[in-house]
Amino acid sequence: MNGDFLTKVFEGPFSQAREWHQAMQQMVLTRKAKPGEVYFFYTTCPKCAKAYGKNYVVGVAAAKASEARQVKAERRLRTTCRVHP
């Protein structure tokens, strides 16, 4: 995987994944980026989650920069590069 991503930790049953997905997309939008793919994974196996009493889930959302922001960033890189002016 490459690109820009935002992450957030959630706690609760996987039945809340729809709400978490919406929260991840909203988080990307607040950063003025376009939401991309959203992935979730558990931090522990089911036995450990039961033993710890918590079931943490990490959300990972791709944040695609808008085209205008991408062009602006590329210009900034070109003007700050000392090797290739």
Image: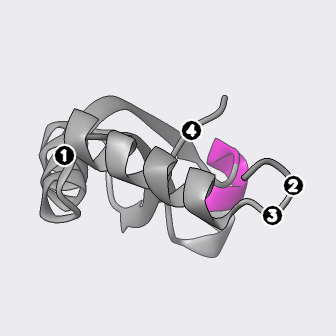
Residue at the (37%, 63%) spot, across then down: 10
- The Cα atoms of the two marked residues, 2 and 3, are separated by 4 Å
What amino acid is labelled 3 in the image?
Answer: Arg
Q: Give the vertical position of 37 relative to 48 (above or below).
A: above
Taking 59 as reference, is 15 above or below it?
A: above
Instruction: Give the residue type at disc 2.
Output: Val
| Mark 3 lies on residue | 82
Secondary structure of the residue carrying numbered label 1: helix
First of labels 4, 3 by sequence position? 4
Q: Residue at label 1? A: 25
The quarter of the picture where the N terminus appears is top right
Q: Give the residue at x 64% y 66%.
A: 80
Q: Observer-nearest residue: 82 or 11?
A: 82
Q: Earlier in the sequence, mark 2 or mark 4?
A: 4
Q: Amino acid at mark 4?
A: Gly
Give me the residue at 51% from left, 69% from top: 54
Residue 65, given in percent of the width and then of the height, sits at: 32, 43
**Mark 1 or mark 3: which is in front?**
3
Residue sitting at the far right: 83
Q: Earlier in the sequence, mark 2 or mark 1?
A: 1
Q: Is the residue under label 3 in contact with that under label 4 (CB below 8 Å)?
A: no
Viewed as shown, does residue 84 lie left or right of 54?
A: right
Q: Could you say which is closer to the camera, residue 65 or residue 79?
A: 79
Question: What is the magenta range?
Answer: 45-49
| Residue carrying label 2 | 83
Instruction: Decide whether the magenta segment is chiefly helix, strand or loop.
Output: helix
Left or right relative to 53: residue 25 = left
